Image (cartoon, grey):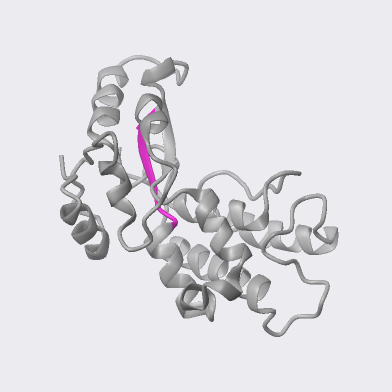
């Protein structure tokens, strides 16, 4: 379930592009005033720029496409695409123990997501809405948004997806912890995470600190 076909160079290229777009949207680096801002949606973005961004990102995406919606901002979409860099389900590096159990139990049959509480969902460990608020109010969070390096660190730390059960997702607190986003999985309900030797070391340390290794 951790295996994927995305090449490292493609994933790194996508991440670099996401950081560049975010930096330009927030800090207006080397662009004119018609370039999108991070809170733009399909209704507010200049369509010519939207087409350019969509073309650039779609060329590098392994999972699905970049599509703005009327009620989803650029920050929402960039967060999704970062967390899906190697896959939304299969290929996602983080899975809860219970989600893995269901996945393995159903693997021999044709997989259908319509399982109610047992359905799998790609959940953002640090709530996407909170991350969007940081990006939308960048001046209040200069430590996270001041330049491309800070933004890259923000995405690597907080724009993380984990495959969990829908029942687990519903029990989670909607309040994130920017110091250790994995501690959210200890509030109210403990969601153990399947040990993956491919985890980055910073996330392994945070998961172990939170006591979530299954």
Compared with 182, 1 (above or below) is above
Principal secondary structure, stretch drawn in magenta = strand
Residue 206, picture quadrant: bottom left
Query: Along the line of sight, which residue is nearer the eye, 17 or 213?
Result: 213
Position of residue 186 relative to residue 106, above or below, is: below
Residue for point 49% across, 65% down: 15
Residue lying farthest to the bottom in this orientation: 30
> Total label count?
0
Q: Position of residue 198 (x, y in %)?
A: 23, 55
Is there any visible trace of residue 80 in the rendered image?
no
Q: Is residue 20 above or below residue 8?
A: below
Query: For residue 120, which quarter of the picture?
Result: top left
Seen in the image, is 22 located left or right of residue 42?
left
Q: Residue at x 61, y 58 (%)?
A: 75
Residue 166 lies left or right of residue 66; in this view the side is left
Question: In which quadrant is the N terminus drawn?
Answer: top left
The quadrant the C terminus occupies is: top left
Determine if the magenta segment contains residue 52. no
In this orientation, which residue lies closer to the viewer: 168 or 101?
Answer: 168
- Residue nearest the observer in this picture, 13 or 129: 129
Instruction: Please provide percent x and percent y for residue 148.
Output: 52, 78
Rendered location of residue 137, percent (x, y): 61, 67
Which residue does the image show at 17% across and 56% down from the upper left? 209
Q: Is residue 72 visible?
A: yes
Give residue 167's quadrant in the image.
top left
In this rendering, the answer to whether 186 lies above or below 105 is: below
In the rendered structure, does residue 163 fall within the stretch colored magenta? yes
Q: Position of residue 124 (x, y in %)?
A: 43, 46
| Residue range of the region highlighted in magenta in the rendering | 159-165
């Amino acid at each position: 379930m951790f295996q994927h076909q995305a090449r490292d160079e493609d994933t790194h290229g996508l991440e670099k592009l996401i950081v560049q777009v975010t930096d330009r949207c927030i800090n207006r680096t080397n662009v004119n005033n018609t370039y999108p801002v991070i809170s733009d949606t399909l209704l507010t973005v200049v369509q010519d720029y939207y087409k350019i961004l969509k073309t650039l990102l779609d060329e590098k995406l392994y999972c699905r496409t970049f599509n703005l919606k009327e009620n989803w901002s650029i920050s929402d979409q960039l967060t999704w695409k970062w967390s899906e860099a190697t896959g939304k389900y299969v290929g996602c590096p983080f899975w809860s123990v219970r989600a893995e159990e269901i996945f393995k139990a159903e693997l021999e049959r044709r997989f259908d997501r319509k399982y109610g509480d047992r359905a799998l969902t790609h959940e953002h460990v640090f709530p996407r809405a909170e991350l969007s608020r940081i990006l939308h109010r960048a001046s209040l969070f200069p430590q996270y948004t001041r330049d491309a390096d800070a933004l890259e660190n923000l995405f690597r730390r907080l724009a993380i997806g984990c495959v969990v059960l829908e029942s687990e997702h519903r029990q989670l607190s909607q309040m994130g912890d920017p110091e250790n986003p994995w501690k959210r999985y200890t509030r109210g309900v403990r969601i153990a995470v399947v040990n993956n030797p491919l985890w980055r070391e910073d996330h392994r340390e945070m998961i172990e600190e939170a006591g979530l290794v299954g």
